[in-house]
Image: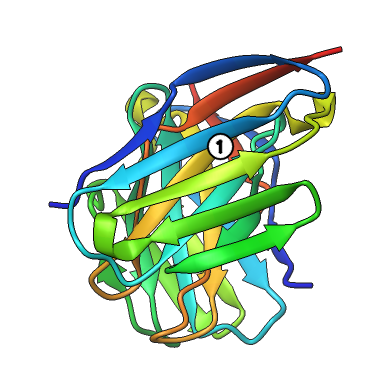
Amino acid sequence: DVKVTQSSRYLVKRTGEKVFLECVQDMDHENMFWYRQDPGLGLRLIYFSYDVKMKEKGDIPEGYSVSREKKERFSLILESASTNQTSMYLCASSPRRGVNEQFFGPGTRLTVL
Amino acid sequence: GIQVEQSPPDLILQEGANSTLRCNFSDSVNNLQWFHQNPWGQLINLFYIPSGTKQNGRLSATTVATERYSLLYISSSQTTDSGVYFCAVERGYNKLIFGAGTRLAVHP
């Protein structure tokens, strides 16, 4: 079974802090994704990566950056957390170009105070 | 951009009942997935079904790509089926567009 893990289930941070959300997959998938989920807005793509050190902006990249130094790990970085970044963050991976069945991690519920 | 519409938005069932959830999409798509989001927030893969019909236990799905819709059937529903069901279609390279979901509550 594909397994996608995220570093924390719940996280509370202060405004202005730098926040790292980590995601690891164990199935040698090429593609990895970060989404956020908000009531009434659904799931929205923040960033994705199709290879090590490669990244592409999704629909809402502002205020976020990402890092993919190893194939299995994809990090989402909030450079200076703000209250409007309070959300549920979901990481996903998929095998490769042309085979995009996405598998999701358990999610991180981030609260920024 | 592609629009993904799910219906009904909310559904309440008694345990043992059957149901059909619908997903309409406005343009041709590469792929389509159905997910179940459990009460803890995790998205569980149900089906990867760009076309045709698949079955997995009490669940089955059918996608008619030429008519731009997909159906998810749940038979003999159980309380553990409660949660939100999402349809998502692939737009362009690797990008999924999610519908707003159908919230299902199954009562004993």
Answer with left or right where residue A83 lies relative to residue A71.
Answer: left
Q: Chain of mark 1?
A: B
In the image, residue B74 sits, relative to residue A67, either above or below, namely above
Along the line of sight, the residue nearer the viewer: A57 or B9: B9
Observer able to see residue A78: no
Q: At which x and y percent is residue A64? A: 32, 52
* Residue under the image location 56 percent in, 85 percent down: A71
Mark 1, secondary structure of its residue: strand
Q: Amino acid at mark 1?
A: Tyr
Total labels: the figure holds: 1
| Residue toward you, A110 or B16 | B16
Residue A75 can be seen in this image = yes
> Is B47 positioned to the left or the right of A32 in the image?
right
Quarter residue B100 falls in: top left
Q: Residue furthest left?
A: B1
**Relative vertical location of residue A8 with respect to residue A95 in this rendering, above or below:** above
Query: On screen, A36 above or below B89?
Result: above
* Spot occupied by residue B21 in the image (x, y as percentages of width and height): 51, 35
Q: Position of residue B17 (x, y in %)?
A: 75, 23
Residue at point 27% right, 71% down?
A56
Residue labelled with disc 1: B85
Residue B27 falls left or right of residue B82: left
Instruction: Place residue A72 in its image quadrant.
Output: bottom right
Q: Residue, x 59% and y 74% (percent of image)? A: A73
Q: Residue at x 57, y 54 (%)?
A: B61
Q: Quadrant of the C terminus of chain B?
A: top right
Where is residue B101 drawn, in percent x and y? 46, 32
Q: Nearer the viewer, residue B43 or B49?
A: B49
Left or right of residue A93, residue B64 in this image: left
Q: How is the image coloured?
A: rainbow
